[in-house]
Amino acid sequence: MQKKLNIKKGDTVQVISGEDVGKKGRVLEIIRKTDRAIVEGVNIIKKHTKPNTEHPNGGIVEKEAPIHISNLMLVDPKTGKATRVGRRLNEDGKLVRYSKKSGEEIK
C-alpha cells in the first residue's frame, strides 16, 4: 500500500526550504516513487539539448526539476499562507483534506 501524501497534482504549494524558499507555484506532477513533485516556476534547471523536432536548433532549455515534497507546504485556500494538512470525515462520510490553519476543507 502506498503512503498518503498531503500534496496532490493541481495544488498550490510554497517552498519552505532550499534555494527557492518562499516561492509559490502549482503542482504539475507528483512522482510517488521518489516522493518528489514538479512545481511550476520552482527549481528551474538549464538542460542542454540536441536538435530535435521540438527544438530544431537544440540549445539550452530551462525546465522545472523535481523537488522533494518535504520541502513543500500546501497553501491555505482561505488565507493564502502555508499550512499543515489534516484529514477528517466530512458529512458524506468521505475522508477529506483540511487546512489546520483555517479549518477550511481543501478541494
Image (cartoon, rainbow, N blue to C red):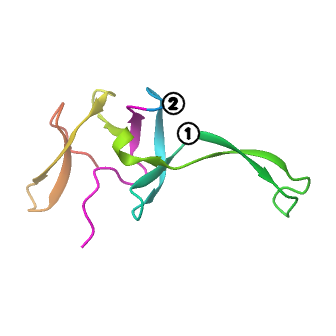
Report the front residue among 102 and 72: 72
Figure check: 8 above or below 104: below
Residue 55 position in % (x across, y down): 84, 55
Dividing the picture into quarters, in which one does residue 21 lie? top left
Residue at the image point whose x is 28% and y is 26% from the top: 79
Q: Is the residue under label 2 in contact with that under label 1 (CB below 8 Å)? A: yes
Give the residue type that dot 2 points to.
Glu
C-alpha separation, residue under disc 1 versus residue under disc 2: 8 Å
Report the front residue among 78 and 49: 49
Q: Give the range drawn in magenta.
A: 1-17
**Which label is found at residue 19?**
2
Residue 102 position in % (x across, y down): 18, 31
**Which label is found at residue 27?**
none
Residue at the image point whose x is 40% and y is 40% from the top: 12
Q: Main secondary structure of the magenta part?
A: loop
Residue 53 position in % (x across, y down): 85, 64
Q: What element carries label 2?
A: loop
**Quick one: label 1, few (<14), some, or many (20+) residues within 10 Å?**
some
Q: Is mark 1 on a helix, strand or loop?
A: loop
Q: In which quarter of the image is the N terminus?
A: bottom left
Residue at the image point whose x is 85% and y is 63% from the top: 52
Report the front residue among 46 and 95: 46
Dividing the picture into quarters, in which one does residue 82 lie? top left
Residue behind mark 1: 43
Report the front residue among 95 and 68: 68
**Quick one: label 2, few (<14), some, or many (20+) residues within 10 Å?**
few
Q: Looking at the image, can residue 27 be seen?
A: yes
- Left or right: where 93 falls relative to 78: left
Dividing the picture into quarters, in which one does residue 13 lie? top left
Q: Tag 2 or tag 1, which sits nearer the N-term?
A: 2
The mark total stands at 2
